[in-house]
Image (cartoon, helix red, strand yellow):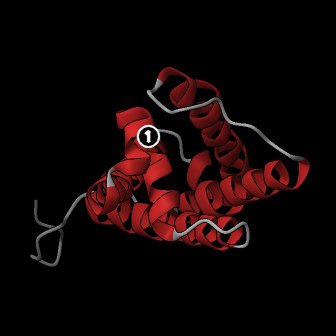
Amino acid sequence: MRNGSGSVRSGPWRTILGAAAVAGTLDLLSAFMVFGTRGLTTDRVLQSVASGFLGKAAFTGGTRAAALGFAAHYGIMLIFAATYILASRNWPLLRRRPVHVGAVYGLGTFFVMNYGVVPSSAAARWPHWDTLTLVHALIVHVVFVGMTIAWFARSER
């Protein structure tokens, strides 16, 4: 598709990919830092994501399981970004209020992941939250996931 200046437009996909890359990286780096203070390596964090597909075998799957976790993490973030950004094309409020609506969306992503996706996956166990981990996870989903994706959506028309 060409825009008025004659150049080819990428549609929403460049925005979706950018939002998924930034939100996914912020979320993942945050997890590496928090769980790193508890002695978990980056591979172990990624293997825990892969356990959604592989169950307990992910923790003995080495680098391949970590790579699967990495791909799954960004795949999920791509779905979250595409959902919001494509919806924002029909509901302008999603673009006009990125802080407020993005915060709500971030909370939604937290609940979808932790009370929908993870329990229905092959993950080794149900999410267990101590207070500090819960607060951290909520803040990360609200700010790094929801608000970041919503901010990217502002540029999509």
Residue 112, image x, y percentages: 59, 32
Q: How many marks?
A: 1
Q: Determine whether 11 is above or below 130 in the image.
A: below
Mark 1 burial class by Cα count in 10 Å: few <14, some 14-19, many 20+: many
- Residue at screen point 33% across, 63% down: 17
Looking at the rendered structure, the kind of residue marked 1 is Ser
Q: Quadrant of residue 21?
A: bottom left
Residue 72 can be seen, yes or no: no
45 and 135: which is toward the camera: 45
Q: Determine whether 122 is above or below 15 in the image.
A: above
Q: Quadrant of residue 115?
A: top right
Residue 100, image x, y percentages: 75, 52
Residue 62 appears left or right of 132: left
Q: Quadrant of residue 148?
A: bottom right
Q: Which quadrant: the N terminus?
A: bottom left
Residue 16 can be seen, yes or no: yes
- Residue at screen point 35% across, 36% down: 54
- Residue at screen point 87% across, 56% down: 132
Residue 19, image x, y percentages: 44, 64
- Residue at screen point 63% across, 34% down: 114
Q: Which residue is mark 1?
A: 51
Q: Which quadrant: the C terminus?
A: bottom left
Q: Determine whether 153 is above or below 54 in the image.
A: below
| Outermost residue, top side | 120
| Outermost residue, front side | 60
Residue 41 appears left or right of 134: left
Residue 151, image x, y percentages: 57, 65
Element type at mark 1:
helix
